[in-house]
Structures are given as structure tokens and as C-alpha cells.
Image: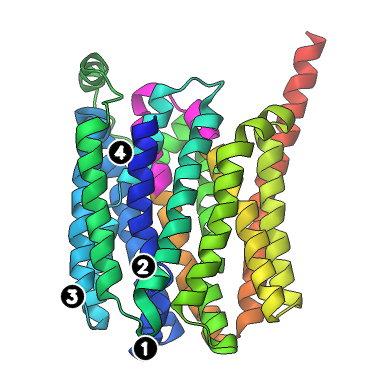
Amino acid sequence: MPILFLTVVIDLIGFGIVIPILPFIGLEIGLSSFDIGVLIAVYSVCSGICGPFWGKLSDKWGRKPIMLFCLFGGAVGYGLLAQADSYWSIFFARALGGVMAGNFGIAAAIVADITTSENRAKGMGAIGAAFGIGMTIGPFLGGLLAGDHYNLVLPSLVAAGLSLAAMLAGFIFLKESLSPEQRLLKAQQPADKSSLYGMMKQTGNRWLCLQYFLHNHSVSLMGYIFPLWVAAMLGWGPKETGYVFGAQGVVAVLIQGGLMGRLVKHIGELKLLATGILGLILGYSIALFFQSETGIVTAFFVAITGATFCMPVLNSLLSQRTPEAIRGRMMGTATSISALGRMSAPIAGGIMLTLFGYSAAWILGIVIGCIYISWVVRELRLAKGQAATASHE
């Protein structure tokens, strides 16, 4: 687990480096809000398409080799991004990076392999903390490396180097979580010809998987709008934006690394998920009604902090509700659905900004959050009903 944690941290630092820079690079070369949204979204589109493929391969060939291959491919994508100087060259580099982004879903599958149902939320929280650390250091470092001239070369090369470092660390230290016997058992099972929808229906995870889409749409919408808003209204650049992303990442690390396990024990996974979603909704509401420097920074912190509680719970619930034989594929599917949420958010946000302005984008975030929490309310009612039935038996 510590080696997996370190590998994810190093890789996420590289991923996070480019986050605060891309919107400003787009503005620098004269792109519209919609075009910038497409550049951000293409990564998620490609990772969404390829996520189940990597998950299925990891079930067959093992988690470790597929993760290492994805890390290498990500390094190649960053190398191409360092040389990109036009819309289409940036587009291609980001697309390749998305194709090779299967390691995030594989990391969740590894945690599911090596933990029990009782401590799975804690394990997912540890991976969430690794994400938080990477997304703390990465954007902060990216802002510093970009400087005042929106330099994309140095941050991209550093990101490529970090992906290679993560690959090397994983190659030397990471242990395979699926034994040869487990892989042989999976290989001997009849090939699953069902569609992704059919698999979700078969396992009863259709509505749970939808929450991955809603969650990532909500979070990515805020992450997309925030740099554009502060650039237009406050004259901020990638350096200042990176500071804010980094500070929020510190909060995420503290929550997922130290509080997740305790909170789950005290209030339960579903109630914790509901609390996090309420934070998302509150953050968007603050942004809608208090569009000042203090208001928008507060909105960002409240929304993203609330979201920090959600993903470890979703991963824990999905792994508990999925048979071990198809867990890798299901986690890959969840990664794909998450990617579709991250893809749709900047495109929808770009349309809203172009046609209606910032207020419409904030309202969209509130609406998505309300749909998101309605499922949790339903699950809480079902759990309460099941508990009442069990007590009468």
C-alpha cells in the first residue's frame, strides 16, 4: 500500500502541473471559452473510452504491468505537450495522455484487491489522500514553473519526468495484487460479452455509476470556470491560480488522509457522501450570490472540500457491490464514467459562459448537485427500511 500511495502521488503531481496552465495558454493563443473547454475535455473523452479496456487487461494480465505501461504512455503524452504550440498539437498531446490514463482506475482496483469490506473505505481514502497530495503539489508547482509568460514547455517536461519516475518506482517496488492463480481463474471464466450497461445492470450498479458522472461533472465545472473567472475579473495568471489549487489540496490531504476513516465509522458512508454533496451545492450557491474575489475563492474552497469526501465513498460502495471476478473492469468502467463527467463539464461550462455568462454556469452546478444528492437520499431511505425490516425478524 505505501508503494502504491507513492506511485500515485508522483504521477498525480505530474498530472496536476498542467491544470492551472492550460486555460491561460488557451487565452494566450486567442482561443474562445468553448475551445479551451474542448482542450480540457479531450483528455477525459479519451480516458473514458479507454478506461474499461485497461481495467479488463489488468484483470487478465495483472494490475502492475498495465499500470506501468499507462505511466510510460502518459510520459510520452507530456513530452508531446512540451513541443505543442498550436490548438491541434495541444489537442493531440492531451488526447494521447487521456488514452493512457488507465492507471487511476487500476490503482482503485489494487486497493479493492488488498483490502476487506471493513477497511476498504479507509484504503480508498488513502488513495484519495495520494490524489490530494499530487493535486496539491502539482498545480502549485505548475504555476511556479509557468511563470508570468505562460510557459508550457518546462511544466510538461517536468510532468513527463515524474511519470517516468513513478513508472520506475512501481517497477522496482510495487507488488502484483492479483496472484497467478487468481488471473488463471479469471481467464478460465467464460468471456463476458455483455455491454457496459449490461454489466452495470447485472450487478445493480447502474445508478451508483451515474453518481460518478454527476460528481466529476460538478467538480470539473468548478475547476474549469475558476481560472477563467479570476483571469477575466482579477487579472490572475497560472501562478496565483496554482496557489489556490495547492492550498485547497492541503485541505483535501488532511481530510482524506486523517478524517475519512473516522468519519465513516461515526456517521456511515452514505451520510458522509450526503454531507460532501451539500458542500458542493453550497459552494456553487456562494459563487452565484457573492461574485467578488472573496466570494469566488470561498466558493471554490467550500465546493471542492465537500467533493473531497465523496469519491472515496463512491469507490468503496462500488467495490463492495461488485463481484471480485469483474472488479477491475467495473472500476475501469467507473473511471470511464468519471471521465465523461470531466469531459462534459468544460464543454457545458463553455457553452454557458459564451451564451449566458457566469451566473448560468453556477446555476448549472447547483442543479447537477441537487440531482446528485437525490440518489443518496434514496439510498439512505432504502438502508433505513432494510434496517427496520431486519430488526423485526
Q: Which quadrant of the structure image shows residue 183?
A: top left
User: Hey, what amino acid is under mark 1?
Assistant: Glu
Q: Position of residue 390 (x, y in %)?
A: 75, 14
User: Which of pointers 4 and 3 indicates the residue nearer the eye?
Assistant: 3
Give the magenta-colored segment's residue range.
Answer: 316-335
Most frequent secondary structure within the magenta stretch: helix
Q: Nearer the viewer, residue 65 or 195?
A: 65
Of mark 4 and mark 2, the one earlier in the sequence is: 2
For the C terminus, the quadrant is top right
Mark 4, residue position:
55
User: Hey, what amino acid is under mark 2?
Assistant: Val
Of mark 1 and mark 4, the one earlier in the sequence is: 1
Mark 2, residue position:
18
Q: Is disc 2 placed on a helix, strand or loop?
A: loop
Q: Neighbour class for label 4 at 10 Å: few (<14), some, many (≥20)? A: many
Mark 3, residue position:
83
For residue 214, which numbered disc appears in the image?
none
Mark 1, residue position:
28
Q: Neighbour class for label 3 at 10 Å: few (<14), some, many (≥20)? A: some
Residue under the point 56% across and 81% down? 230
Q: Is disc 1 placed on a helix, strand or loop?
A: helix
On screen, residue 180 versus residue 309, left or right, reads left
Q: Please check the rendered image and state whether residue 318 is part of the magenta-colored stretch, yes or no.
A: yes
Q: Neighbour class for label 2 at 10 Å: few (<14), some, many (≥20)? A: many
